Amino acid sequence: MSFYSRRRDYRNYNDRDNNARRDYATAPILQVPMAIFTAPKWVAYKEVQPVRAAWIEAKAATFDFADAMYAAVIRYGDLTQGQNDAVDRCVARDAQRASQRASEPSYNNGLDCRAVRAAFETFLRAGQRKPKIVVEGFELSLAPSTGKNPGAIYVKDNGQYVGKIVSSTESFTPGRDFNPARMEALQAVFRDPRAAVQAEAARIAARIAAAQAAGQSIDVPCGCCGILLTDPVSRARGIGPICAGKWGF
């Protein structure tokens, strides 16, 4: 065999190996009944690695990585050290998140969000889209119907996401960045959004009067859409006539 032929053969071997790796990397996730983990290789792996196996079984139906790790065990009987390390990191991460959730105080007791929901429904019944309330530095907006939380109401505090009102329970679920010191102000918005907008308008009116007394002018955004108001009556109310009609305020 010529030297060139040998080089060509070596190249073919490399191509074969590379193709095999590509095939494995891009192969569809192994479709198995995830509630039944009885394959001999899996049972053997589970006996040696119970913690890792328990995490994979719990996540395989919803997490592609866990599904891929299950497929690897079924195929090879074990995971590589790097794969086991990756699973360990996932286990540790989930345990940390569970611990954080357990230590977070609950804000749902006594927190009635039905008035907020009713306001949003009034807005939608008026044939409007993308309802939003901006008051006390909070921004309440309806989650997209095609997103992960259809029907939920997202809550931001000065532009930062801090939680949501879940449609199934009509309760507020705080996010990791929620500031408990802002809870009282948020409760006031939830309890009566119309009154919260009116209270904001009163504060704005006082700021306008103080600014005028000092010969100054201030920007006044609409308490629902955030557009700057120019009409003196609307500026004093803190909400434009169009938004007031849409929301029933």
Image (cartoon, rainbow, N blue to C red):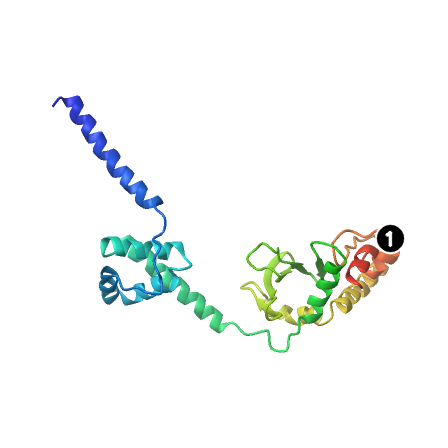
Position of residue 152 measured from the top left corner of the image (x, y, whole percent): 61, 62
Q: How far from the left and from the top, in percent, is residue 198? A: 80, 66
Residue 80 seen in this snapshot: no
Q: Which residue matches tag 1?
A: 231
What residue sits 23% from the left and 53% below the top?
Answer: 76
User: As shown in the figure, which amino acid type bears the numbered disc 1?
Assistant: Asp
Residue 55 pos. (x, y %):
35, 64
Q: Give SS at disc 1.
A: loop
Give the left or right position of residue 44, taking residue 112 as reference.
left
Q: Quadrant of residue 187?
A: bottom right
Residue 205 shows up from this direction: yes
Task: Determine crowd level at label 1: few under 14, some 14-19, many 20+ residues with C-alpha closer than 10 A.
Answer: few
Q: Is residue 193 above or below residue 10?
A: below
Picture residue at 78% right of the left edge, 67% below the top: 199
Residue at (74, 58) in percent of width and height:
224
Q: Quadrant of residue 194?
A: bottom right
Camera-side residue of 64 and 113:
64
Residue 103 horizontal side relative to residue 18, left or right: right
Rendered-image quadrant of the N terminus = top left
